[in-house]
Amino acid sequence: MNDFRKKPGIDRSGIKEVFIEGLLLISALASILAIFLIIIFVFAKGLPLIAKVGVFKFLFSSTWDPVNGQFGIATMIAGSLAITLGALIWAVPLGLALSIFLSEIASPRIKGIMVPMIELLAGLPSVIYGFFGLVIIVPFIRDYLGGPGFSILAGSVILGIMVLPTIVNIARDAITVVPREYREGSLALGATQWETISRIVLPSASSGIITAIVLGMGRAVGETMAVVLITGNVTRMPESILSPVRSMTGNVVLEMGYATGDHQLALFATGVVLFVFIIILNALVSVGRKERV
Amino acid sequence: MSLYKIQAKDVCLFYHQEQALFNVNLNIEANQVTALIGPSGCGKSTFLRSLNRLNELIEGTTTTGEVLIDGVNIYDNDTDVVKLRKEVGMVFQKPSAFPMSIYDNVAYGPRIHGITKKNTLDEIVERSLRQANLWEEAKDRLTSSGLRMSGGQQQRLVIARVLSVNPKVILMDEPASALDPISTAKLEDLISELKKEYTIVIVTHNMQQAARVSDSTAFFLSGHLIEYQPTERLFVNPGDKRTEDYITGRFG
């Protein structure tokens, strides 16, 4: 008996296999194609303008005056970096503390309440955050700290809340997958729980934690709607955290509606710079991952 | 002081409503290797983990009864669990070096117990690695990651890590189950050497191993201690029908 031989005639199951494989390949290619089209389109529109203005001038001039052909986005790079940094300064420590609490300390009951709430935080549309900032944070800063209220500080507060779930979810996963043997091995040596967390668990999870921070940073740099609503959007170099700023994303969304000619291309060029920022951040993640043993 | 290093008295363990250990009474002598054998889920590992209160890390477990080590009940309310676990070291099934250098792996224990002097740490690391028969293989690569070692080497590294804090008792939970025969032989040699200075309790699935390394053997079944004898007698002339069935391979 040779039961494993192919049956003579048409091999129906074989055709089905090939068909399904082909379908999956096409789906995969379609998503890659989308990414390539976007890259080509944005760069094709933006790069010539950067070349025309000059890379240095485009990146480091703080004069943004489209009517007179002055395209310098230094104020917006500064704005994006300032609110991102401001958000990370408080959201990273808090997010880490929260991830440690949820993965190492919290009882299942508390976890059952907190985890869905944090996930909900991740799912809220950004305009809701912006609206919350606009009616609560901005007036609060104006009344108690001074300035117009629309400021780096307002952006940092809201962006921090927005990146918190990104950081917590990824960092918590990274901490949870640290092998139980490490924890038990450490505790069995007479280490306390905190010694075990700080010296064994966190270092073991460090690449995942770095990924969490960098992806949080990516989310902060790319956030648009909430930022537009609360940072004031002026193209001036900020003097303090109470100064209003415009982010790169804000620049694109605010002016794209009416921009034409070089002005429009300059907005694409802003997009190119944003793109490069994100690519650098993603590259950092991969490098961080590879460095682990 | 009692004659025995470890005395378990009526140890019961519950996982939520389920009972996993039923009134286990077991006396373990100093400087001996005691093997715990039995089919999967019989409670041998659970019993082992009750000797350094490691079961407490699992939510929903309660232990009753007493475990005396050198005559002191480790389940007393005034027991410092952290100190207890320093005295009662543990080696786990999966060889798991910490993701740090070989040196730092061994120095981890002394460091958390407050030793910071480089010279002292160097001495402890060397002594522990020598005791674990790992010094020759490790001395030239102390700064490389412990994770780059083979499974057998990692398991001896874990033993060196345990020895670094001067325990009295070493618990081993199927320490050779992930190792090849040569690494296993090295580990068994090591166990025989270590018993000169330490009291060792080892859980094993491998009955030949129990026969080779242990002085006494305890057979567990469904959470009950069925039989506890000098190893030779238990294997040659078991007193209980169920022990005989198990060691002759009729079940388990």
Image: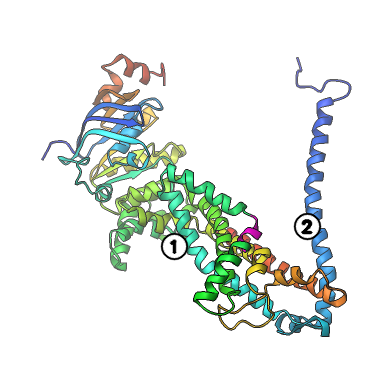
- The magenta-colored residue range is A125-130
Q: Is residue A107 visible?
A: yes
Mark 1 belongs to which amino acid? Thr
The residue that disc 2 covers is A35
Quadrant hosting residue B233:
top left
The residue nearer to you, when weighing A153 against B31, is A153
Which chain letter matches label 1?
Answer: B
Q: Is residue B203 magenta?
A: no
Q: Secondary structure at mark 1?
A: loop
- Residue A242 appears at what percent x and percent y? 56, 78
Label 2: how many residues lie within 10 Å, few (<14), some (14-19) or many (20+)? few
- What is the total number of numbered labels drawn onto the structure image? 2
- Residue B227 appears at what percent x and percent y? 26, 22
Quadrant hosting residue A76:
bottom right
Residue at 39 percent across and 50 percent down: it is B157
Q: Secondary structure at mark 2?
A: helix
The residue nearer to you, when weighing A285 against A93, is A93
Give the residue furthest to the left: B1
Question: Left or right of A16: which side holds B246?
Answer: left
Residue at 56 percent across and 81 percent down: it is A240
Question: Left or right of A172: which side holds B62?
Answer: left
Q: Main secondary structure of the magenta part?
A: helix
The residue nearer to you, when weighing B70 against A26, is A26
- Residue A6 appears at what percent x and percent y? 81, 23
Question: Left or right of B21: which side holds B252?
Answer: right
The residue that disc 1 covers is B143
